[in-house]
Amino acid sequence: VGDGGGGDGGSRGLAGGRRRSPSSSASPPKRPAREPVQKVGVYLEIENEDKRRAAAGEPPLSRADIDLMMRNFFRRQKGEPELASGTNAGWDVVDSMKGKGKGGKGGGKGCKGGGKFK
């Protein structure tokens, strides 16, 4: 019984020691104020366009607009032609290439799975 009490006392002593160090470092050394991070690249373009729209009273950029801006930024870096704003950011081309195969595959999987579990 005495050993158990001593063990508890020892652990309390350690816990007490642990409590002291955070309290002593409760006031961390003050760091110099950091400047805001400078945006670059596509993020700078998006921010500038967002500010321009806000100043002109236009609606903010939608997710599709931001996606298209990002795609066009990287296409310009690669030397590829930019996508027009009506092209659905290139996904209409991908969807048209898939065609009926996507629906057929989905239906086939559904039928097979339904047959196994019935």
Image (cartoon, rainbow, N blue to C red):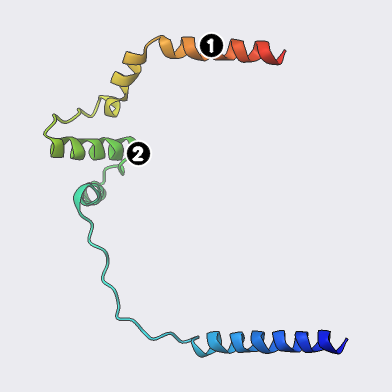
Residue 38 spot, x, y in % from top left:
22, 61
Which quadrant holds the C terminus?
top right
Q: Nearer the viewer, residue 115 or 65?
A: 115
Query: Of callouts 1 and 2, which one flags the residue occurring earlier in the amino acid sequence?
Result: 2
Q: Which mark is residue 107?
A: 1
Q: Amino acid at mark 2?
A: Arg
Q: Nearer the viewer, residue 6 or 93?
A: 6
Residue occupying the far right of the picture: 1
Residue occupying the far front of the picture: 3
Q: Amino acid at mark 1?
A: Gly
Above or below, comparing residue 63 to residue 89 in the picture:
below
x 76%, y 85%: residue = 7
x 54%, y 84%: residue = 22
Q: Is residue 21 left or right of residue 13?
A: left
- Provide the secondary structure element on which disc 1 rests: helix
Q: Is residue 11 left or right of residue 71?
A: right
